[in-house]
Amino acid sequence: MKLKGTAMRDLDEFEDALIGRFKEHPVLTNIALLSDDDFAEVLLQRRFVSLAFTPSYDLAIDLLRDEAGLRIARIILREEYPDGHGHRPSHREDTTADLHRLGVPRAALVASRPTATTLRAIADTFELIADAGGHDNADLRLLTILRFWGEVLVSVEYGQLWQRMEPLLNRDGENHSRFYYPHHVHDAKTRSLATVPLLSGTHSDRLAARVTELLAFEQSTNCFMELEEQALQLKVDFYDQFLPALDRVGV
């Protein structure tokens, strides 16, 4: 049982339009123009959102009932902590390593605190996930949020941030990024919803394979589109707080 090809193509066009809107956020398109201090503040605030990634997945896992979706979510969550013996750093530690390579000192990490806007973005994410769990089609809703908020749009924003990072993290032909670039790659949407295979490589595509299966049992795709709009708005609201940084450089 599958959605008709035209319906799935329509969803792809809708989703790709949202991705395009996010890429065009003024802060992301002009990231290379920000002062070093303002760019560091973007990264420090984004770090707090990254810290909320694992509890967001845990909350969704608590509410999921679909075994196939659960397995995908569990695997992705466990990849955040690749070594159960403590010999390898977690992805959160990889974030900090990249920040240090980008010139953000430990003192700045110690002094950094989440802004009210950042805290609201995190709280609103938890609320979106919790609300999704209360619906009859909770599994579709939860996996849609995890995929679009936690994977697709993350890949997009790290791809935009990479424009500023690349000269510092890509030296002598070698990419030294442990967090931002790898997540830009393995969180990305690489296949359309209409053609994503069951055995997919990136996190986005793995989740998409199950999302498209669950969509086949829906009378309408409205909830999918509404949740992706809401996930996008969470990201936009977060980056809007840095618009004054553009004023400071005359953009």
Image (cartoon, helix red, strand yellow):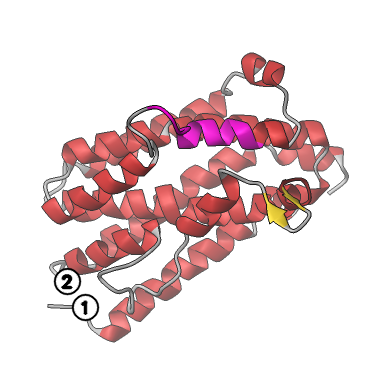
Between 207 and 12, the one lying in front of the other is 207
**Which residue is label 1 attached to?**
3
The residue that appears at 79% across and 43% down in the rendered structure is 246
- Number of numbered tags placed on the structure image: 2
What residue do we see at 65% from left, 55% from top?
160
Q: Who's the residue at 42% across and 49% down the image? A: 149
Identify the magenta region.
86-98
Residue type, label 1:
Leu
Q: Is residue 247 left or right of 7 when viewed as pictured?
A: right
- Please report contact status of discs 1 and 2: CB closer than 8 Å, yes or no: yes
For residue 98, side relative to residue 49 (left or right): right
Q: CA distance from mark 1 to mark 2?
A: 5 Å
21 relative to 200 in the view: left or right: right
Q: Is residue 144 above or below residue 51?
A: below
Residue at the image position 61 percent from the left and 42 percent from the top? 239
> Mark on residue 24?
none
Residue 87: in magenta span: yes
Please tell me the numbered disc located at residue 216: 2
The single residue placed furthest to the right in the displayed view is 250
Chief SS of the magenta region: helix
Quadrant of res 85: top left
| Mark closest to the chain's N terminus, 1 or 2 | 1
x then y, percent, for residue 195: 33, 79
Disc 2 marks a residue whose amino acid type is: Ala
